[in-house]
Structures are given as C-alpha cells and as structure tokens.
C-alpha cells in the first residue's frame, strides 16, 4: 500500500472541531511577536537580507555564521538537502516527519527506510547503521529528535554514533525547543558530518510565515546555500527569527516547555486511565495506540464527537490504529480521553 508522504495534520482538521491534529503550540503569535512582524512590513519594498537572522542563530547557539543557514521553515531545508547533499544510499529513520523522504523522492533518489518498532519503544539502535548493520552502507541518514510522531527523544550519543566517514547525518530538531533544557540537541562545537534542522513555527504560532534554520558542518551548509533560491527567507521571517531568538523569547520558550511537559503528563495520565497507551513522548504531542478499540482508525468517530486528530497510517511503520494528539490544556485532554472512553463502551442494540 502506498503512503501519502505529503499528508500532514492540517488536512485532518475541519471547521467546528477541536484541533488536536496540528502541532503548532499557539493559534497565532503572541502580541509582541506579531508587532515585530507587522513592523517588518515597512521594508517589503526591499529585497530581504537574511544576515540578521544568520547572526541571531549563530549567537543563540554559539557557532560561526558559516555554520548557519536561515530557511523558509524546516521543510525547505529538507528540499535543499535532497538537492545538494551527495549520496546514493539515503536512509530515513521512521516513523518520522515524511517531508525528508518526500523531498528525496522528488529529487529522484531511491530511499531506504529504517523502521523503529513499537515493541522497542521506537528507540533508535545505532548498531543498525554500524559496520555489520542492515544500513551499514547508508551515506545519508535522516532522523528526528524528538521524533514526530512518536515524541521519542533519542540520546545525543546514539545519534552521534550514526556518523561515519563519507556519511552525512541530518537531524530534525523541529521540536527540540519544546524539550526543557534541550539536553539531547546535537548543536555544539563538533558539527562534522552533521546538519541540524530547526523550526520556529511550532513554538511561536508562525506556521503561515515559514521560519526555520539549519546549523551544521560549514562545508555542508555551504552546499545547501548554493542551491537555495534567492531571497527564499522573507523579510517578515527574518525579523521573526531575530525576535524568537532574543533573550526574552528564549526565556518564554523555556517556560512554555516546562508547562507543556506538565500538560503532556496530564494527557498521558488521562489516556492511561481509559486503557490507552502512548509512545514515551517528550514532545508537545503524543502517539496513541488505539488498538484496544479495534484495528480500524478512530479518527472519524472522534470527529463525530468534536475532535480532529492526526491519522497514523500516513507515517511509514504505523497503521490506522495509531493517532497523534497535540498536547493542549488539561480540560481538553480530559475531554478527548472521555470521548475515547465512550468509544470503548459497547453500543446498545435497539
């Protein structure tokens, strides 16, 4: 069965439903950030200059500017990787955000899959990419951390263990800023063979603006820069990037990560109380195993009860009995757990 790699949570949302399908934390940017974006509109008559965003990212992460490339969201970065990073044996670690594989396929490159298993808590096993592993010949590896849709946070040492001479490792850290303290981030002094992709759209309600960046090996970043379309990152996106990496914004994001972890614990607890297990998430979403309710998807049943959820079957390695739920406030978590409990109760026959 073919999988629609371009299916994303926004396609599971419909008017009138509580949106648990999209992983954007805020429905709109906070007022102070909206003001920054609005102010940037004064400069729309001039071509955008990404250098302030580059400088802000470099300062935020303590790296040289040559290690940084602002992008139009994380998705553009994967397209640039598919076009610019050499390799004949790319492998994507799944279940995973599907745009990296879609970009490779669109570039005419055959893609291998390393599928992590539920029975192993969707944990990465670096030995699969070692000298005797199934994917020993991979020369480009893409892995999420924390991974979408599982929310699993892999130890940095396990991801770093994927590196080999002649191999590029691309790490999707789109949700790392939602992990308190970002303990497993690979952005650091040793970026050899690495490209780390970040997104600002999730935490800051900027999905419609497209703001993200890459930090990595300067040789690889230069290759991405060489194929990036001119003026790819808009003036409002540059302004938003600078603002989102300010001391004020970083403190606000840290606080949101802590409160989000508490809200996620409520959701996981409510689901457990109605007999539904989840993958061990550290992200602002949870992957739910609804197989106790049957092999079919519960998505349409939940929609009838007022909830939009992200279907699981468009992620390689998952089937229709999996759904992804965005973490919202405790009241919403209790409501969706109650709806799932209602689906467990046998229906009376008239």
Image (cartoon, rainbow, N blue to C red):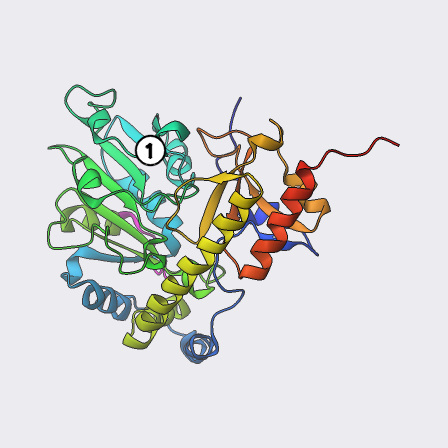
Q: So how many labels did they put on this image?
A: 1
Q: Can residue 61 be seen by looking at this rendering?
A: yes
x%, y% of residue 179?
33, 56
x%, y% of residue 205?
47, 64
Q: Is residue 9 left or right of residue 182?
A: right
Frontmost residue, 62 versus 149: 149
x%, y% of residue 4?
52, 33
Q: Residue at x 22, y 34 (%)?
A: 86
Relative to 235, say whether 78 is above or below. above
Relative to 47, say whether 181 is above or below. above
> Quarter-wise, where is residue 143 in the image?
top left
Relative to 4, say whether 155 is above or below. below
Relative to 337, say whether 243 is above or below. below
Q: Residue at x 58, y 31 (%)?
A: 292
Q: Is residue 232 magenta?
A: yes
Q: Residue placed farthest to the right in the image?
A: 350
Q: Is residue 97 left or right of residue 333?
A: left
**Which quarter of the rendered picture does the C terminus lie within?**
top right
Is disc 1 surrounded by few (<14), some (14 to 19) or many (20+) residues within 10 Å?
Answer: many
Q: Residue at x 41, y 30 (%)?
A: 118
Q: Can residue 242 be seen by looking at this rendering?
A: no
- Region in magenta: 227-233
Q: Is residue 345 left or right of residue 274?
A: right
Residue receiving disc 1: 93
Frontmost residue, 321 versus 5: 321
Q: Residue at x 71, y 48 (%)?
A: 305
x%, y% of residue 115?
36, 28
Q: Is residue 2 magenta?
A: no
> Quarter-wise, where is residue 284 in the image?
bottom left
Q: Secondary structure at mark 1?
A: strand
> Quarter-wise, where is residue 170 in the image?
top left
Q: Is residue 116 left or right of residue 10?
A: left
């Amino acid at each position: 069965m073919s999988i629609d790699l371009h299916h994303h949570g926004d396609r599971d949302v419909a008017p009138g439903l509580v949106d648990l399908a999209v992983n954007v934390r805020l429905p709109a940017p906070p007022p102070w950030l909206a003001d920054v974006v609005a102010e940037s509109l004064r400069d729309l008559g001039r071509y955008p200059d990404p250098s302030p965003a580059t400088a802000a990212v470099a300062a935020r992460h303590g790296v040289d500017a040559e290690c940084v490339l602002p992008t139009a969201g994380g998705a553009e970065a994967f397209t640039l990787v598919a076009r610019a990073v050499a390799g004949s044996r790319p492998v994507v670690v799944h279940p995973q955000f599907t745009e990296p594989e879609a970009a490779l396929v669109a570039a005419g490159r055959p893609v291998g899959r390393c599928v992590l298993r539920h029975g192993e808590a969707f944990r990465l096993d670096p030995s699969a990419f070692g000298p005797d592993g199934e994917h020993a010949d991979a020369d480009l590896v893409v892995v999420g951390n924390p991974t979408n849709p599982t929310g699993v946070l892999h130890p940095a040492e396990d991801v770093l263990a994927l590196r080999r001479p002649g191999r590029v490792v691309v790490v999707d850290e789109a949700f790392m800023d939602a992990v308190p303290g970002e303990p497993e981030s690979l952005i650091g002094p040793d970026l050899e063979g690495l490209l780390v992709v970040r997104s600002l759209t999730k935490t800051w309600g900027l999905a419609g603006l497209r703001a993200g960046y890459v930090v990595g090996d300067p040789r690889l970043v230069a290759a991405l820069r060489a194929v990036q379309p001119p003026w790819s990152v808009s003036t409002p996106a540059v302004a938003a990037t600078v603002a989102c990496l300010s001391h004020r914004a970083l403190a606000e994001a840290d606080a949101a990560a802590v409160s989000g972890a508490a809200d996620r614990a409520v959701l996981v607890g409510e689901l457990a109380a109605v007999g539904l297990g989840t993958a061990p998430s550290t992200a602002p979403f949870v992957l739910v195993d609804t197989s106790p309710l049957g092999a079919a998807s519960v998505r349409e049943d939940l929609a009838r009860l007022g909830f939009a959820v992200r279907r699981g079957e468009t992620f390689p390695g998952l089937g229709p009995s999996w759904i992804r739920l965005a973490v919202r406030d405790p009241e919403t978590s209790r409501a969706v757990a109650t709806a799932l409990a209602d689906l467990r109760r046998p229906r009376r026959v008239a």
